[in-house]
Amino acid sequence: MTDPQATSNLPPKLAQPARRALANAGYLRLEQLAGVSETDIKQLHGIGPNALKQLRQALAERGLAFASERS
């Protein structure tokens, strides 16, 4: 079986609760997060302000961003 961490490109310093929250929701790669709004990610148990900041920065470094908020 393949180690999920081996296929993940989430920030290396992202806390374990945030990693688990994302993995449980099916997000292992930053590219997957680019299709999701920040509000949706914030609702995951284990995602706090620091995790969001790290994810935002990692997305930006790859020219990506969270999906636009729905109005």
Image (cartoon, rainbow, N blue to C red):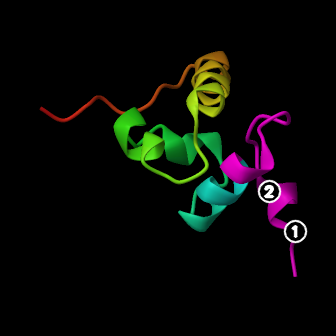
Q: Residues within 10 Å of mark 1 (few under 14, many from 20)?
A: few
Q: Is residue 58 above or below residue 48?
A: above
Residue 9, magenta (yes or no) = yes
Q: Farthest residue in the left direction?
A: 71
Q: Is residue 38 left or right of residue 60?
A: left
Question: Would residue 38 appear left or right of 55 to someone viewing this image?
Answer: left
Residue at 49 percent of width and 52 percent of height: 44
Q: Secondary structure at mark 1?
A: loop
Where residue 55 sits: x, y (%)?
62, 30
Residue in the picture at 45% in, 40% down? 42
Tell me whether the residue at label 2 lies in contact with that at label 1, contact meaning CB atoms closer than 8 angstroms: yes
Give the Cα distance between marks 2 and 1. Answer: 7 Å
Q: Amino acid at mark 1?
A: Asp
- Magenta: main secondary structure: loop
Is residue 8 found inside the magenta-colored segment of the image? yes
Q: Which residue is mark 2?
A: 7
Which percent across, then down, holds residue 33?
A: 51, 42
Of 4 and 62, the residue lying toward us: 4
Which range is magenta?
1-18
Residue found 80% across the figure and 56% down from its top: 7
| Quarter occupied by the C terminus | top left
Q: In the structure shown, which secondary structural element does the residue marked by tag 2 occupy?
A: helix
Residue 65 place in picture, x, y as percent? 48, 25
In the picture shown, does residue 65 fall above or below 37?
above
Q: Number of callouts in the render?
A: 2
Please state which amino acid type lies under the numbered disc 2: Thr
Q: Quadrant of the N terminus?
A: bottom right
Q: Residues within 10 Å of mark 2 (few under 14, many from 20)?
A: few
List the residue tagged with mark 1. Answer: 3
The image shows residue 59 at horizontal and vertical percentages of 60, 26
